[in-house]
Amino acid sequence: MKKKNYSQQEKLKILKECEEKGMKPILEKYGIYPTTYYYWKRKYYVSGESGLSHGNNKASQGRIKELEKELRVYKEMLAERELEIRLKDELLKKKYPQTKK
């Protein structure tokens, strides 16, 4: 098969055609390997339409990993804060059992 670079709009059109008419006939029509189709499909579901463009691969992937790391840190901070609040509530209940929250 001859290698062809598809635009973002063409990739989106092919993905939608595959959903409507079935994958095998559409891929044969355009001469696309199934692995390429699944790669495009994964990129589309992860990043939306912008995931299908050529220019966002390495630069945006690095930024995404950086943001995921930052999100993990924030989640850990939130979990620690929630744990502190629970411990304080339990200590208050033990010290002042007659009070209700």
Image: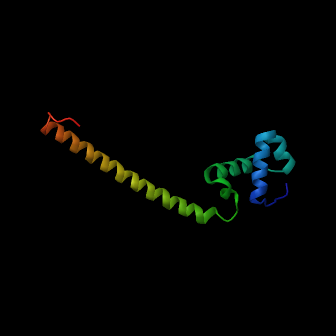
Judged left or right of residue 53, residue 67 is left
Depth order, front residue of 96/14: 96
Q: Nearer the viewer, residue 5 or 21?
A: 21
Q: Identify the residue at the far top of this view.
A: 98
Give the x, y percent position of residue 14.
79, 49
User: Dividing the image into 4 quarters, which one contains the N terminus?
Assistant: bottom right
Locate residue 64, reporting x and y percent.
54, 59
Q: In the current view of this chain or complex, which residue is farthest to the left?
A: 95
Report the label total: 0
Q: Position of residue 43 (x, y in %)?
A: 65, 52
Task: Report the residue that reaches farthest toward the right.
Answer: 29
Q: Residue at x 70, y 47 (%)?
A: 38
Query: Which residue: 21% across, 39% down?
Result: 90
| Depicted 88 relative to depicted 69: above or below | above
In the displayed structure, 24 sits above or below 6; it is: above
Does residue 78 appear left or right of residue 49 in this picture? left
* Quadrant where the image shows the C terminus: top left
Query: Which is more toward the observer, 36 or 80?
Result: 80
Quarter residue 98 falls in: top left
Q: How is the image coloured?
A: rainbow
Which residue is found at the position 85% from the left and 58% from the top?
2
Give the percent coordinates (x, y) of residue 74: 40, 55
Closer to us: 2 or 101: 101
Which residue is situated farthest in the front direction here?
100
Residue at 68% x, 55% y: name it.
49
